[in-house]
Amino acid sequence: MPAVIDLRSDTLTKPTPAMREAMFAAEVGDDVFGEDPTVNRLQQRVAELLGKEAALFVPSGTMGNQIGVRLHCQPGDEFLCEADCHIYHYEQAAYAQLFGVATRPIATPDGRLTIDAIAPLVRGTDIHHPRTKLLCLENTHNRHGGRVVPQEAIAEVCRWAKEQGLACHLDGARLWNASIATGLTPAELCEPFDTVSVCFSKGLGAPVGSAIVGPSDKITEAVRVRKVMGGGLRQAGVLAAAALHALEHQFDRLEQDHANAQIIADAVRATPGLRLVAGRCDTNIIMFELDPSLGGATAYCRELRERGVQMYAFGPDKVRAVTHLGVTREQAETTAAILAARVTTPA
């Protein structure tokens, strides 16, 4: 039986043989003492690549984001974010559980926060209110179908936020995809932000790891926050080596994932009963809605699985597919054919 084409997430990638060799050969030390040379090399490389003074290797994107919130907020403060963002939706309100920080989510039609939406919600020194200290953005935006938020819009809202005394943090888990899609460098995408978190374990194909970057004093403090969150690793060079290999060898190939995603997105556009969310596919995430006659996302994904393709039911009538290192052009074309064959024209 042919292998199932698994499009549930780009976290499903497995280390390539060359990456495994790099991990095996990694020079290591105790990173809690700051003595792992491979981790130190990764941190220096990421800081340079993202145009910031310093970087810190962390186990996960969630930890990177939560450290970012804590660096800018004290207990009783609040931050603003888009209502569908990862920090608000998928990180278990860790900012409240761990740090006593509140959030104020803002609903948008397209994942993009504007000054008009934010301005009425910034709160100052009134003793009845939490103090608004931070603006968090996400690029690319997962729940809006891997959408690339226009850089001019990001720059404008961050510039305004800083004028109001707010810090700015970017959840850049898939920043690498935004860079490939826009032609802008990672440093250009990160320039408006005080701190940025990025993931190595999605499209880049490393098995574990993220980083948070920012000014040296903030990253020094981030080391303390990482420790209290249980993120102090020892001989972490075996993991950092995978991230370094991914940056050096698997960054540019993200363009292939985007091309493969377009093959599937085109099939969605052409198939009765399926509607591409916002009519677009910017990067490696294909998000589409189902006509009610198709029986709902869970049943639809179950039937696709029986035909050899796995996708993710993203809600009652919404499905997500994500291309990645483990998906070839041929598999994308096969998926497109299966989508077309699965659906009959609704009555």
Image (cartoon, rainbow, N blue to C red):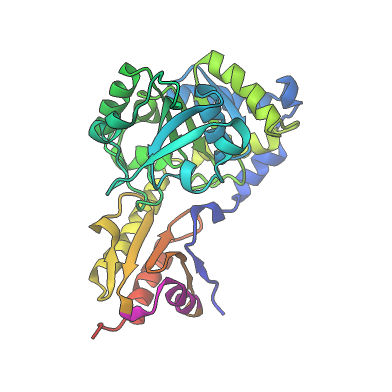
What's the residue at 54%, 52% (across, down)?
11
Give 107 or 321, whichever is nearer the viewer: 107
Give 31 or 332, whichever is nearer the viewer: 31
Give 134 or 227, whichever is nearer the viewer: 134
Q: Is residue 242 left or right of residue 310?
A: right
Q: How many numbered circles does the render carry?
A: 0
Check the image and name the residue furthest to the front.
Answer: 128
Q: Where is residue 278 in the image (x, y as percent from the top left)?
A: 25, 56
Quadrant containing the C terminus is bottom left
Does the magenta segment cover residue 299? yes
Q: Position of residue 213 (x, y in %)?
A: 51, 25
Q: Is residue 260 visible?
A: no
Q: In this view, does 97 lie to the left or right of 27?
A: left
Dominant secondary-structure state across the stretch colored magenta: helix
Check the image and name the residue furthest to the top.
Answer: 217
Does the magenta segment cover residue 266? no
Q: What stretch is highlighted in magenta?
A: 293-305
Check the image and name the residue furthest to the bottom.
Answer: 347
**Picture quadrant of residue 211:** top right
Q: Where is residue 129 in the image (x, y as percent from the top left)?
A: 43, 27
What's the residue at 59%, 53% (across, down)?
14
What's the residue at 36%, 59% (across, down)?
286
Q: In this view, does 161 lie above or below 210?
A: above
Q: Is residue 247 left or right of residue 191?
A: right
**Picture quadrant of residue 299:** bottom left
Q: Position of residue 126 (x, y in %)?
A: 40, 20
Quadrant containing the N terminus is bottom right
Q: Is residue 67 above or below residue 265?
A: above
